[in-house]
Amino acid sequence: MTDDVLTPTSTCTRLAGRRAVVVGGARGIGAGIVRRLHAEGARVHVLDRLVAEGTAVATEVGGAFHEVDLLDPGATTRAVEAAVTGLGGLDVLVNSAGILRFGALLELDPRDWAEIQQVNTVGTLTTMRAAARHLIAGGVGGAMVNIASMAAKHGGANEGAYAASKAAVVALTRVAALEWGAHGIRVNALCPGYVLTEMGAATRTEADVARWSALSPLGRLGEPGDVAALVAFLASDDGSYLTGQAINVTGGMIMH
């Protein structure tokens, strides 16, 4: 690696003055995104249901934490409003919250299906709508980045509900890009592959990690920083001509 490779501790300020809200920013990929946006100059507020972890990350970057329950659209909208008010406006929204549960389709509990769709899909739509109203009113546009999943394009066995929810996030991203582009709002999705975070940690083994790593031409799994770096790019003016895209962050596991 060269010395000019951008890291979370770099002095790049391409997001200086930007006001960002990260939903699901308490840990994992979301926390990595919070830290990266802050490192590039943005002011960041964190929304999450995990109070202790979310408060710690927000405090670390000099931001504020807002508790949110994505199962409650009204409360979700109010949490976004509180964050925007605290920031004095909005330039960037990142949706990184999500839940993952495994189960064969023939055995899938409809209640699990409904909760996964409510959090991963309806929750994303709710925050997007709340943010869009502010961005449109501001008159200068902004950027939204939705964290979908490789499962949206290549859902695996026993993850039907999760794959469906993330495919819906990709579809919402494209529709929002079409509807809000005239207001200068860019909306993109990222589709991470296997990223080592707290999600799924209880069920994966060392053998799983080795097997998944072998699927990538690069021979490794992703890290939160791999996703966060692309979020920062899309949130900045460097990504000003990208909208409606669902970009793979999979180390080559998915190439379409």
Image (spheres, rainbow, N blue to C red):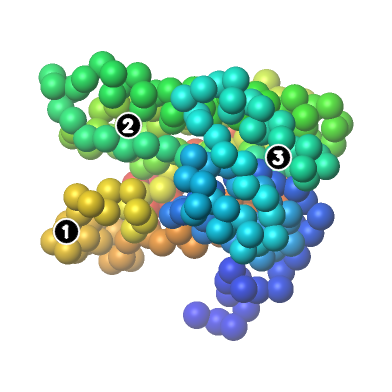
Q: Is residue 200 left or right of residue 125?
A: left
Task: Give the residue displayed 74% in from the left and 61% down from the top.
Answer: 41
Name the spot of residue 213 as percent of width and height, x first: 25, 61
184 or 15, nearer to the observer? 15
Q: Looking at the picture, how far across and down is residue 27, in whole percent?
A: 46, 54
> Which residue does the image show at 64% across and 26% down from the upper left?
77
Q: Residues within 10 Å of mark 2 (few under 14, many from 20)?
A: many
Q: What residue type is labelled 2?
A: Tyr
* In this rendering, the label closer to the viewer, 3 or 1: 3
CA gap between label 3 and label 1 equals 38 Å
Alpha carbon separation for disc pair 1 and 2:
21 Å
Mark 3: give few (<14), some (14-19) or many (20+) Cα within 10 Å. many
Q: Mark 3 points at which residue?
A: 83
Residue 248 appears left or right of 67:
left
Callout count: 3
Q: Nearer the viewer, residue 61 or 56?
A: 56
The image quarter in which residue 167 lies: top left
Residue 11 visible within the image: yes
* Tag of residue 205: 1
Q: What element carries label 1?
A: loop
User: Mark 1 belongs to which amino acid?
Assistant: Thr
As drawn, which residue projects farthest toward the right? Answer: 139
Mark 3 or mark 1: which comes first in sequence? 3
Q: Which mark is residue 162?
A: 2
Q: Earlier in the sequence, mark 1 or mark 2?
A: 2
Residue pushed farthest bottom?
3
**Label 1 neighbourhood size at 10 Å, few (<14), some (14-19), many (20+)?**
few
Between marks 2 and 3 in the image, the one whose residue lies nearer the viewer:
3
